[in-house]
Image (tube, rainbow, N blue to C red):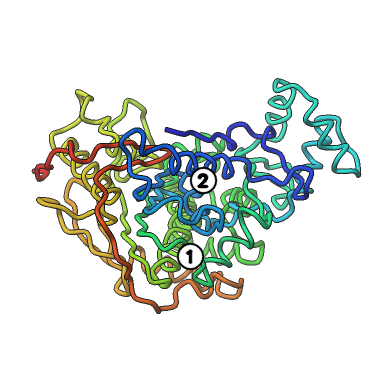
Amino acid sequence: MCTHLCASMGTLCFRTGDSQARGNWALLDQIAALRWVQKNIAAFGGDPGCVTLFGQSSGAMCISGLMTSPIAQGLFHRAISQSGTAVLKVFITPDPLKVAKKIAHLAGCSHNSTKILVDCLRARSGAEMMRVSKKMRFFHMNFQEDPQEIVWFMSPVVDGVVFLDNPVELLTRGQVAPVPYLLGVNSMEFSWVLPFIMKFPLNKHWMRKETITKLLWSASTLLNVTKEQLPLVVKEYLADIDDHDWKRLRNHVMDLAGDATFLYSTLQAARYHRNAGFPVYMYEFKHHAPSIIIKPRTDGADHGDEMHFIFGIVLSKGYSSRKEKALSLWMMKYWANFARTGNPNGKKLPYWPRYNRDEKYLQLDLTTRVDEKLKEEKMAFWMRLHQNEGPEKQGSSEGGSAGGSLRDCPTTQALGRLATDTSRTSVMPSPV
């Protein structure tokens, strides 16, 4: 089990984008771990020909990114991205030197020479660099700073080694690992966890259209919205809502943020992979995780809620219902089946169709069912909004049939999140 924490380590993962500090440290760590698995896992009874990558949130973005990396090719054979893909615009830092200079300034290491700058930063203690990280205010709203200058987190770069080009460009050209891909989102990605971490206010004081517009502009680079596009976005999501109905405004802001980030990028990634001709299985998880935390809404799944079910946490919680426990067993079986065979389907499980031209996907809830074209009207809006921005325009094109041969894996290894002997997974009962 490997965990990579460049997002939380902040400035310790700085990069200049040149030979002095090329960057992509976390991804290189992951690739090194995969190479270790290829060389050594057989000695532990594992199969180096059956490795599944599995990540959630920033981990999901890494998995999606590794699928476009030439130096990761052949090191894994299935991939799972939960709530995140490399299509999310902030996944790649376009100007790493600019960010490095900002960090260097806060650390007292400003210099025109990247060698001297990097040497100075590397001479700082871990405690000093963590103080600089706090000053950078990673993943926090900053209403005083120009939105174009905000650094949300230390993200990867196009370095000519891990990434030969922006992953979106590579996906557009079909340059992606030829492996089955399971990916999806939660129905309310921006409900409580992310606003809480970001200090994104969703209270009555802020939920007026004028102040909401200011909020959205401050988060515009994260939402991938320009100043010119912002009025169109506000009109699409908030036009018909009375300014005094603050709870309804809040709910629509939650939907807007989730659609703009996780949902749109996930659908684009699914389409790129499908169009390249490889098997894709998509889901929407819709059930909130039982919790003692009081959240604004419990009519959908918050960011990370699916983890409680995939790892069986609800099975040990006394306040979980029988239906919730059955859903957890179903999901564990789906994930284990996919890791073993590249197909989540199995005995006594509701059928999960491939994500083909009809764009069918599985709704994971107490009542699990197949649907198609997830949030079709809203996704059409975002497609129109971004249609002149390059590679994303091509993401919806039809083409390529899902294909590729699969073979069963007697043993499963899933780096980052899961290590399961699927032969010991019990058959799941129907949630009733």
What secondary structure is found at the residue carrying circle 2?
loop
Quadrant position of the C terminus in the picture: top left
Mark 2 — residue? 207
Indicate left or right for 138 with 168 as reference. Answer: right
Q: Nearer the viewer, residue 336 or 238?
A: 336
The quadrant of the picture occupied by the N terminus is top left
List x then y, in percent, for residue 352: 22, 59
Q: Is residue 180 left or right of residue 14?
A: left
Location of mark 1 (residue): 236
Q: Position of residue 69 (x, y in %)?
A: 55, 56
Between discs 2 and 1, the one toward the N terminus = 2
Q: Is residue 179 left or right of residue 137?
A: left
- Going by the numbered disc 2, the residue's amino acid type is Met
Task: Please provide percent x and percent y for residue 342.
Answer: 29, 56
Whole-percent x, y for residue 302 in the image: 38, 42
Which type of secondary structure does the marked residue at label 1 adopt?
Answer: helix
For label 2, count other residues whose C-alpha is less than 10 Å away and answer few (under 14), some (14-19) or many (20+): many
Q: CA distance from mark 2 to mark 1?
A: 16 Å
Q: Nearer the viewer, residue 110 or 160?
A: 160
Q: Nearer the viewer, residue 19 or 351?
A: 19
Q: Which mark is residue 247?
A: none
